Amino acid sequence: MCAAKTVRPSNEYLLPNTRPEAGTRLALLSAIFDPASEAALARTGVGPGWRCWEVGAGEGSLARWLIARVGTHGSVVATDLDPSLTDSCPGLNVRRHDVVVDAPPGDHFDLVHTRLLLCHLAEREAVVDRLIGALKPGGWLVVEDFDGVSMPPDNQYGLQETPLATHAALQALFRSRGVEARTGRWLSAMMRVRGMTDIHAEGRMFMALERTIYARLHQLTVEQVKRDLLTAGLLTEGEYTAAMIALDRNFLAPTPILWSVVARRPAASREHEEVPR
C-alpha cells in the first residue's frame, strides 16, 4: 500500500456541504448505501445502552438509525467537518469536528462508524489508529469506503457499457487532491495489521442505468466539482454536456464498490504491526 503522495490541508474537501448540490447528493448516498451500512452496523449487535460515535455524519441518517437502536440509555455523537446538513433528533449530540486534528469526542465507545471519509484523507492511517483508540476494549469499528478502480466499464459484450469522460476526469481530480480510490479494498488489511479481530467484509455495488438514482448521484458529484474539473483542464464543456445527456438518455456502467468492514478491538490491547507502505 502507498499513502497518497499529494498531501492537502485537512480542511480542504472537494465536496463541501456548503455547495448547493451537497444536500441532495448526501441524501442520494444515504438512499443507495444505508441498507448496506445498517446491515454492517447490525452485525455488531448494537443495542440499548451502547455509546456510539458516527464520524463524518453527513446528513445524519445513520446517526438517527443508531439513536433508535441504543435507546434512551445509550448515546450517539455525530461529528462532521461541517455539520450544517446533519439533521438532529432527540438524544443525538451533533458536533463540528475535524477527525484529522481534533481529539475524539470521548473514549471507550462501544461502536465507531465512518463511511466514505478515509479515502479523502492523506492522514487515513493515523485516523484509523485514532478511531480504534477511541473504542473500549472489545468495542466495534465499522469502516466503509469505495473501491473505485476495480470495476471500470467493460465494452466486450455488445459495446453497451458507457465510459464517460466525467469518470476519468473525476478520478484524475480526486487523485490530484490526495483521494485514494483503492481505500475500500484496503480496509480489511488495515484492520488485520492492527490486530483487530472478528473481521467481516462485504462489497456492495450496482449497475447504473440512465435516469436512475445512481446516474443522478454521478451527475450531482460532477456538478459539485465542475469548476475544478474545467479549471484543471480535465474536462471540457462539450464533454460535460455529452455526459449529462448520456446519464439522462443512454447510460450503463457499474458504480464503485462500497466495502463495509466490521472489526473488533481485542479485549486485551496489543501493539499493532507496522502498516505496509
Image: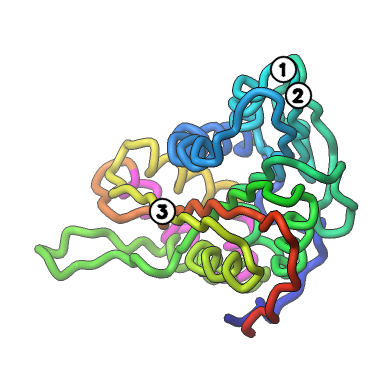
The residue that mark 1 highlights is: 89
> Left or right: 66 with respect to 151?
right
Magenta residue span: 226-247
Q: Residue at x 80, y 30 (%)?
A: 94
Q: Residue at x 67, y 18 (%)?
A: 71
Pointers 2 and 3 in contact (CB under 8 A)?
A: no
Q: Nearer the viewer, residue 178 or 46?
A: 46
The residue that mark 3 highlights is: 202
Q: Amino acid at mark 2?
A: Leu
At mark 3, the secondary structure is strand
Q: How is the image coloured?
A: rainbow
Residue 126: image location, x then y, percent: 77, 67
At mark 2, the secondary structure is strand
Q: Report the disc number at residue 128.
A: none
- Give neighbour class at mark 1: few <14, some 14-19, many 20+ (Cα, 10 Å): few
Q: Residue at x 62, y 83 (%)?
A: 276
> Left or right: 11 with respect to 153?
right
- Kindly tell me whether residue 173 is visible in this rendering: no
Residue 120: image location, x then y, percent: 66, 61
The residue that mark 2 highlights is: 92
Residue occupying the far left of the picture: 158
Residue 83: image location, x then y, percent: 77, 35
Q: Nearer the viewer, residue 53 or 17?
A: 53
